[in-house]
Image (cartoon, rainbow, N blue to C red):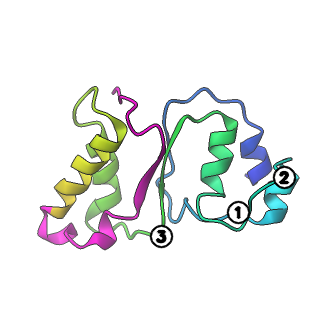
Amino acid sequence: MSFAEIFGLRIDADLVILSACDTAGSATVGATREAGVTGGGEFALDGLVRAFVGAGGRTVLASHWPVPDDFNATGRLIAGLFAEDGRATAEALKASQEALMDDAETSHPFYWSAFAVVGDGAARLAR
């Protein structure tokens, strides 16, 4: 899917999780213009994140670099977000990251620090 196709979606999502590699990366100026967006392009958080926010995602979780799937770190991080019902998104991400930090196999920041919440980090998660 292109930036324009995603931007043109009409979704009603409290949370969009982009768990693939480097989903917080930039979009080209051409891609944003194609979608009718006249400002931006070539900046971090300007690619998929901006496309999904434009489509209706109120909060987006994205990664700033390719994270290897060694030790199922990304899967564990995402699953950890929903370990407790009703936590704020940013709080849930922090707790999930701390769980990876506490494990010797995934304690290096490379495994857990790429992920960021864009949007309403205080929004509550529900399973």
Sequence-wise first label, 3 or 2: 2
Classify residue 101 by image quadrant. Answer: bottom left
Per the rendered image, the range of residues in magenta is 102-127
Q: Is residue 9 left or right of residue 52?
A: right
* Amino acid type of the residue tagged 1 in the rendering: Ala
Is tag 1's residue or tag 3's residue first in the polypeptide sequence?
A: 1
- CA distance separating discs 3 and 2: 26 Å
Q: Which residue is painted at 34% across and 64% down in the image?
A: 113
Can you say whether 37 is above or below 100 in the image? above
> Compared to 10, does 81 lie above or below?
below
Q: Amino acid at mark 2?
A: Thr
Measure the alpha-carbon separation of dots 1 and 3. Answer: 14 Å
Nearer to us: label 2 or label 1: 2
Q: On the image, numbered disc 1 is attached to which residue?
A: 27
Mark 2–mark 1 Cα distance, whole angstroms, equals 13 Å
For the view shown, which residue lies furthest in the front direction? Answer: 39
Give the camera-side residue of 71 and 2. Answer: 2
Contact (CB < 8 A) between labels 3 and 2?
A: no
Label 2 Cα crowd, 10 Å radius (few <14 / some 14-19 / many 20+): few
> Which residue shows up at 42% across the image and 54% down it?
116
The residue identified by callout 3 is 65
Chain-order first, disc 2 or disc 1: 1
Q: Is residue 101 magenta?
A: no
For badge 3, the amino acid type reads Trp
Picture disc at residue 38: 2
**Residue 108, magenta (yes or no):** yes
- x, y percent for residue 121: 40, 40
Q: Disc 2 on helix, strand or loop?
A: loop
